[in-house]
Each structure stands twice: as structure tokens, then as C-alpha cells.
Amino acid sequence: MAQSNGTNKEAPAYPQVKRLLNGDSSLTSFSNLQGRITLIDFFGTWCVPCIKALPHLQEIGKKYKKDITIVLVSNETEAQLSRFIRSKKDFAFPIIVDVKNEWNDLFQPPSLPYTVAVDRSGKVLSVKPAGDITDEDINTWLSEKETTPAGIKSKEEATMAIIPETKTVNPFSRLSQEYIYAAKTGEPVAELSGKLEKLDYRELVQTLSNDRERKAFWINLYNGYTQVALKGDPQKYRNRNAFFKAKNMVVAGKRFSLDDIEHDILRRSKPKWSLGYFSKLFPSRREKELRVDSVDYRIHFALNCGAKSCPPIAFYDAAKLDAQLDLATKSYLSGEAEYEPVKKNLVALPKLMSWFRGDFGGKKGMRSILKKAGIIPPGAHPKIRFKEYDWTLSLNNYTN
């Protein structure tokens, strides 16, 4: 579901509440939890921006307690969530345990945090990060005319009610999405790998006809292959340089390494160690045919190389890519960037922004990105340092 501030004409069919923590466990219907406005906050105990947003949600709950109900949704285990609740003093929110991903499948959050505002009938009013919700937003929602509950629809109809209409996904993008889904669920990928290998190369080039299609396809394959390869043999990560260079992925009859995908295709023929300031003098014909037209710094907040410091993995869709990448960027920076405005006037940024600093427009560009993401205020000009990167192997880091 793409980030949106628009409303929808009908309510989706909400799943049953099969397990509720920190609330009345006898409630099984979402309608029993609803207020005049309900904020459904997709949440993870591991998600730093999610944790940071909780005090803001608590303030909203206190200020608008007669009108606003807040419910968290997590696909973590009941044991993990119970430990988290016990560790927090006066934890105020009920949590829907969504281990079967029924709620996540319905709303399809591209990354966390992800908060959906719905009215009493269940109609979606807005989607935005919890920390960005303002009094103006709430007053706008409260001023809208309430609707009566809509009839229950099928899951497919419900999903279409909350997802903006998009063009049909091309078969190559669909295949990349199926591959990353199999990587997440642990299903065998041999059949999908065979399909990728047998793709027609010329048709691949023609179908991935714009940067949105190219980025979605190759980001999904990069993330999916990394997970499959390292789950199969974690020892490969002991020699990371060899792992990223190995041309073990076959797409449309051509062999690719993870470095090929990241630096030749997604970074438009930029050498790995050039800090993003130089391009290859003589890129291959294949690179020219497959690479993006322009470098998008946001890919660095979408690619997961298997390390603990990597951004979480989302399922990227060309039709919703800009909203997904914007959300991934803001989510990752909100959790990783550390701003100290008073004593040191310093912001600490993830190391990957140093490795590819040219992609970000240098330090001047980085400050602009931080302002856009709301990490630093408009007039700020902090010094920048880069944090150490944690290369500890960390698999299964998905947004949902």
C-alpha cells in the first residue's frame, strides 16, 4: 500500500483479532476496538523509529482520548511482544499479534513505521508515519462526515479498496517479487531460479523500460538472492568480498554478481571504491542496456547485503516505488542518524553514506536529505561524522 493522504470510498474487510495483548483478550472483532478515529500502527520491537514514535502516539491518545483509539499491529511472536510490554513502564497500547500476517497482507506496509488512520466505519482516511501525525491531521479527520459500516468484501476486493489503482505488474517484476517472497518464507527457489535463467534477454531489456521498473526488479533480486545464498551457506560471509563478486546469479542467460547489480546497474556503472564520484570509462554493452538512467541515492536504504547495519528488506513494486523508497529512506535515517544540536552541532550518519558519498551529493547533499527527512531543522548546518558499520550477519530482516 503506497503512502497516501487520500481517503477511500469503502472500508476493507478487516481480519479477526485472533490474539490481543495488553487489552481485553476476549475481543475478536476490530470493530470492538475502534473509536471515532482509529490509528492502526504497524510496529516492530526491533524498529528504532517505531519505538521513537510511541511517546508521540501516547500524547495523541491522551489529548484526544474521547475520539482517538490507537492499536499496534506486529507479526512478531507473542513471547517477543510480551517481553517488550513488560520492559516498558506504563505501556499504553493494545497489540494485535499478527503472526500469520493477515493484517500485514491486507495493508502491505512497504516498511516500518507505518500508520493507518481509519474512521468508525473502517474507511481509510490517511497513511503516514506515526511521528508525522499532527493536530491539523486529526482535526481534518474528525471533521469528515462519518460513514456507516460497509459490507464485508473479499480479501482481494478489500485490498483494492485501500491500494491506489496501478498498472498491471509486468511479468518480470512479478517474478522478482515471487523470488523475494520465497526467500522470506524459506520456500524452494530452484523453479524460480530456472525461470529467471530462461528469460529472454532482449525482452528483459525492452520490458524494464524505465528506472522504476529497473530499480524494483533488481533491488528485489539483489535482496532475495543475498538471503537465499547466505541462508544456504552462512560461511560465504566470512569472505564478503568474494561473496559480492561471485557471478552466481543467472538472469536471462547472463551471469551476475551482487556487485554487478549494485554498481553496474543500480549505480550506473560506478566503481565500488570510487566514493560515488567517478564512473567507468568503458562500461560494457550489457551495462549500458540494463543500467538506470540516473543514480538514485535512495537505493542505498533499500539494498540489504546481509549485515546487521543494513536497511530492512521490503517488497518493491515499480508502480509504488517512489513512495516506498521515500519511506525506506526516512525510516532508516530516523533510526540510524544521531543529531546533537546543542553541545557539538554534530550529526552521526550510517557508514554507507560515506562509502557512496558522491551518490548523496557529498556532505551538502546529505544535509539536504536530512532536512527533507525531518532529521535536522531547515536552518541547521551540523558537522558530519560517520558511524562504524556492523558487519555481523543478520538475516530475515524484513519490514513486514
Image (cartoon, grey):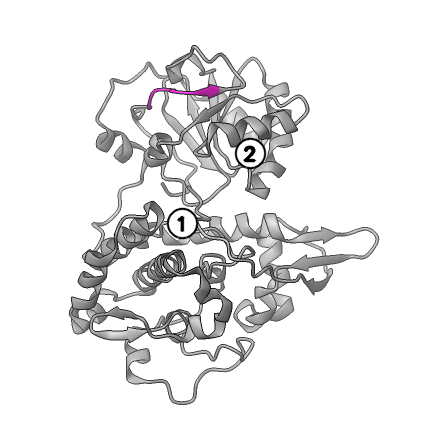
Q: In this orientation, does residue 158 appear?
A: yes
The segment highlighted magenta reads 15-20
Secondary structure of residue under mark 1: loop
The residue that mark 2 highlights is: 133
The kind of residue on which mark 2 rests is Ile
Majority SS type along the magenta span: loop
Q: Residues within 10 Å of mark 2 (few under 14, many from 20)?
A: some
Measuring from the top left, give residue 124's x and y in whole percent.
Answer: 38, 28
- Label 1 belongs to which residue? 314
Task: Say which residue appears at 59% left-offset and 26% top-offset.
Answer: 85
Task: Name the image quarter holding residue 371.
Answer: bottom right
In the figure, is residue 199 to the left or right of 15? left
Q: Residue at position x 36%, y 49% from top?
A: 315
First-in-chain label (2 vs 1):
2
- Residue type indicated by callout 1: Ala
Gap in angstroms between the C-alphas marked 2 and 1: 23 Å
